[in-house]
Image: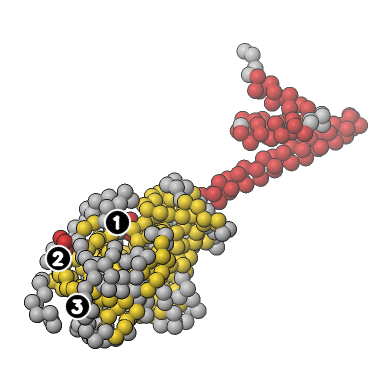
Amino acid sequence: MTQPTDDLRLDELLSRYWDNTLSAEEMVELNAQLLANPEARHRLRFLSLLARVSCDHARRHPSRQQTARRRSRHRRLALVGCVAVLLIVSLGLYFFKNTNNSAETTSAFTLLQCIGEVQVGSNNIVQPAQTGQVIHFGQTVATIGLDSSAVLRCEHGPSLSLMGETEAKIRDEVAGRHLSLNRGGFLAKVHLGQPAFVVTTAEAHLRTTSEECQFTAYRTLDHTEISVISGRVQVSTNDGQSVLQLSHGEIALVEANGMVLKQLATAAPEQYAWDLSRPLPADWRQGQVITEPSAQPYGRAVVPLLMDDPYLRRTCWQIRSENRWTTGLFAFHPDTHLRIRYRVDRTGEGQLLAVIRPDPPRPEACQVLLAPISFTATPPGVWQTVILRTNDWQVEHSPKRGPLDYPQPWIAFLVVFNTYEQNLGLKVSEFAVRRGPFPTSASN
């Protein structure tokens, strides 16, 4: 039977290796064959064993001492060479294997879904994100606009759903499992047995355990909110002075002053109202309170301020409530009613919108509801009152989103009045929510 060509080539390489006439290219070829072919490594070990036996035989025949010494010297050199080749092959296999393992354990995040506008930033360069894109360590992911979202997954780490107006950086201190949350919020799912997932914000340090875990984190202007849906999350201030553990159904607020508040999660409230007898909440997004004697019920009103809207890419006059992604501002039930008292000095284009999510939360399912109200000028001191039912609101039609397919109650976590580039002189004196109709008396 004719010997295979590959075997003949291997024998030729080994023979030239024994004769010390192997070129650098042939040495690379020999190493490649030894790395890829177990039979080649077996043959090398066999020849090494023959070299050892030959040396032993030479030592047993002193009558041929001179020849044996010469052959023994060659065999020893050959044996050293074989050992060196085997060592190179073993080290190559070791590093090849560990490089693959390292690639597995340090897998970056993959962007599974982009809804709306999603950006990826690195070294001060920001580019539009694409579905399927790999997000490397040190890069930043940002969702632009209220109804934008991104879903990311790390092969050996968590799955993340980022909600609108969120910015997060993938850190490399703990490969693929460390996130810095600069603003906004996300939902994280960590599977059983996976390494700990670490999240840092300006106020808090979060760390999961080895059990299966699902939680949300949201960073406002001055505090971080954490809500645990399942599993456990260790929460601490960044200085480590206050540490607590959250379990299923618990919420924590970590404030900028180091205070940590823990409470049980409750359903979003069914009643909600702006209390203009008090200062606006510290994390109120946009707008200010003015004294307006004709305004009911407090003699005060909220007016918009000029801001750059990153989603609309326009400078707009807006009132934006505080963002309550974790707990919700209020719940939309089928019998929910809203009462708004407002006026404008000049007729123009405007809108009232509420951003809603399902319960339990899914950031990728957030929707924007638009209220049918008129921004029509009225005489001084005259206020318009509108009462809206749940089915009066309309879903903002956008190719970014599918239909609103999750059941009520819907959880509203942000409310916005917007008159775009025009200052219409908008004033809002009341924003109230309740289940069931409001009393007919305007003072109630």
- Of 179 and 395, nearer the camera is 395
Residue type at mark 1? Ala
Residue 389 marker: 2
Q: CA distance from mark 3 to mark 1?
A: 39 Å
> Where is 287 relative to 59, above or below?
below
Horizontal side, residue 106 vs residue 66: left or right: left
Check whether the beta carbons of the residues at disc 3 and disc 1 lie within 8 A of each other.
no
Q: In terms of sequence position, does the residue under pointer 2 or pointer 1 come before the other?
A: 1
Report the mark closest to the observer, 2 or 1.
2
Pick the quarter of the image with the N terminus.
top right
Q: In terms of sequence position, does the residue under pointer 2 or pointer 3 come before the other?
A: 3
Residue at the spot of label 3: 382
Q: Quadrant of residue 420?
A: bottom left
Residue 365 marker: 1
| Crowding near the residue tagged with mark 1, few <14, some 14–19, many ≥20 C-alpha atoms within 10 Å | many
| Crowding near the residue tagged with mark 2, few <14, some 14–19, many ≥20 C-alpha atoms within 10 Å | some
Q: Is residue 211 visible?
A: no
Q: CA distance from mark 2 to mark 1?
A: 22 Å
